Image (tube, rainbow, N blue to C red):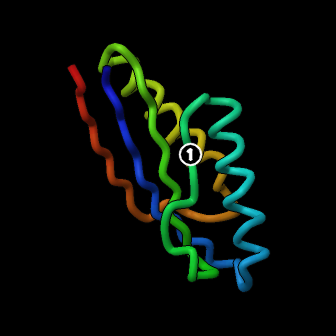
């Protein structure tokens, strides 16, 4: 089993309240879950109104598939955030469980 975990740090400069931030982050997390079938959540920077950290993970029996799903999810997030925010940092971790 291979797991690829990705942590996106997102700048949301037009957000001035937690409600505005939620309007960007929640739909992103839901779409990652439903369209790309990855586990996703807002995992950091909850106290900031102009930034967020969203984490997601792809699991597969082979590394190539897990990497491809994670790459697709990252591209989806980048496309979704156009005009809403910008990914300013990406951390990727891969683990293999035998």
Q: Residues within 10 Å of mark 1 (few under 14, many from 20)?
A: many
Q: Quadrant of residue 36?
A: top right
Name the side, left or right, on which 85 lies relative to 30. Answer: left
How many numbered marks does the figure carry? 1
Horizontal side, residue 32 vs residue 16: left or right: left
Q: Seen in the image, is 60 located left or right of residue 43?
A: left
Q: Residue 53 appears at what percent x and percent y? A: 50, 63
**Residue reaching furthest bottom?**
16
Classify 27 as above or below 61: below
In the image, residue 81 sits, relative to residue 5, either above or below, namely below
Q: Height in image: 96 above or below 12?
A: above
Q: Residue farthest to the top?
A: 61
Where is mark 1, residue-wise?
40
- Picture residue at 30% right of the left edge, 20% below the top: 63
Residue 33 image-quadrant placement? top right
Residue sitting at x 51%, y 74%:
45
Q: What kind of element bears circle 1?
A: strand
Please state the horizontal and vertical placement of residue 79, each as a whole percent of the image. 62, 45
Residue 86, position as x, y percentages in the image? 55, 63
Q: Quadrant of the N terminus?
A: top left
**For the view shown, which residue lies furthest in the front direction?**
98
- Which percent across, then down, holds residue 8? 46, 56
- Residue at position x 67%, y 50% in the image: 28
Quadrant, the C terminus: top left
Residue 36 lies left or right of residue 20; in this view the side is left
Q: Please tell me which residue is depicted at 77% across the width and 64% down the height of the picture.
A: 23
């Amino acid at each position: 089993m291979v797991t690829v975990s990705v942590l996106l740090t997102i700048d949301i400069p037009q957000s001035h309240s937690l409600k505005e931030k939620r309007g960007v982050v929640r739909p992103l997390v839901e779409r990652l879950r439903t369209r790309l079938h990855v586990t996703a959540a807002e995992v950091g920077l909850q106290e900031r109104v102009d930034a967020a950290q969203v984490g997601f993970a792809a699991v597969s029996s082979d590394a190539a598939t897990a990497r491809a799903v994670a790459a697709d999810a990252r591209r989806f997030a980048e496309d979704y955030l156009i005009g809403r925010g910008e990914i300013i940092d990406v951390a990727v971790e891969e683990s293999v469980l035998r």
